[in-house]
Image (tube, helix red, strand yellow):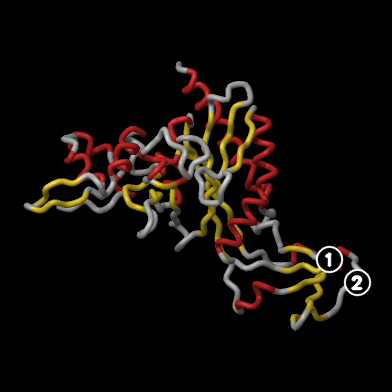
Amino acid sequence: MSQKKKYTIEFEHALNEFVKELQQYVSTDTGEWTIKGFIDIYKNIYTISSDTKIVSKILEIHIFPELLRFAEKSGYKIILAEHQNWYPDLTLVHKENDAIKFALDLKTTFRRKNKSTGFTLGSHGSYFKERDKDKNIQFPYNQYTGHYCLGIIYTRVDFDDDLAETEVFQVNELEEEYGDKLIGARQVTKVEHLKSITSVIKDFDFFAAPKWKIASDSQGSGNTANIGSIKDIEDLKAGNGVFSKLGEEWFDEYWINYGTATMIKAGEVVKITNIWDFLEFKGRTDLIDKVVAKGAKRRKK
């Protein structure tokens, strides 16, 4: 077994064990998020909006101490992305062998119709194609031993009144003698316990996977060069992406050539933007049965 393979197996095992622990760390026994809002010096609790950008950032802050603990326990140090739009969110570098680096992106998203969701898996442009360059990436792509996603899927709580998302509470169990019944124009609501404040999200699912195993053959957003994930939640958790049976090499080659390679179809030059055309273009239609079709673009007859 190669050194790279050995480190990869150990890292994946540790990451999957860590993911199992996150459920009880972020949620109550009824499935609600343990974060209820933020607090001022008078112990007033300000609830937060369920806006995805706000929730995602707070979730990342919430689990960061656990990520530090995971890294320390596993023998890695964490390097944060130097700029907000750089890939990846976290780089884990082995303390005894700094040639071993794992990219870890945190992906938080909400359920759609209880069964599906989706997110982007990073760019298929610049650093993905020029793998020895460090533009918009912490280390050149080919210096990473593996590229992983830590996914957090949740359900958004529907409120009858949008303003309910930004209520102010005073909690009796905090026993604060200061504060007022009004903060600005907002009424302060008295409650007995923190648990009685409704969380804006609930019912978490966590998973970790190499990003190539959960990739689709479609872009994740229309106007940017981002790789899209598959959308079925159970397939995400099981790593049943379009390329999961083809292998990482086919994932790499497909996305390096996405939208730039062309072929002749029905007498016209077309850009290759689906796995079916790409395998035909490569003369490997014998591999079509290995495509996990559920997450792929529909194959044209």
Q: Position of residue 151 (x, y in %)?
A: 52, 47
Identify the residue position indicated by label 2 in the image.
178
Q: Secondary structure at mark 2?
A: loop
Give the amino acid type for the residue marked by disc 1 in the picture. Lys
Question: Where residue 21 is drawn, which disc sits there?
Answer: none
Up/down of 201 relative to 161, above or below: above
Q: Nearer the viewer, residue 125 or 181?
A: 125
Residue lying at 44% horizontally and 35% vertically, measured from the top left: 141
Q: Residue furthest bottom?
A: 185
Identify the residue position indicated by label 1 in the image.
43
Q: Is residue 213 left or right of residue 204?
A: left
Q: Nearer the viewer, residue 93 or 152?
A: 93
Which numbered disc, 1 or 2, marks the residue that appears first in the sequence? 1
Q: Position of residue 98 (x, y in %)?
A: 57, 25
| Gap in angstroms between the C-alphas marked 1 and 2 | 8 Å
Q: Are marks 1 and 2 in contact (CB under 8 Å)?
A: yes
Q: Please rate how many residues cluster around mark 2, counting C-alpha atoms within 10 Å: few if below 14, some from 14 to 19, many from 20.
A: few
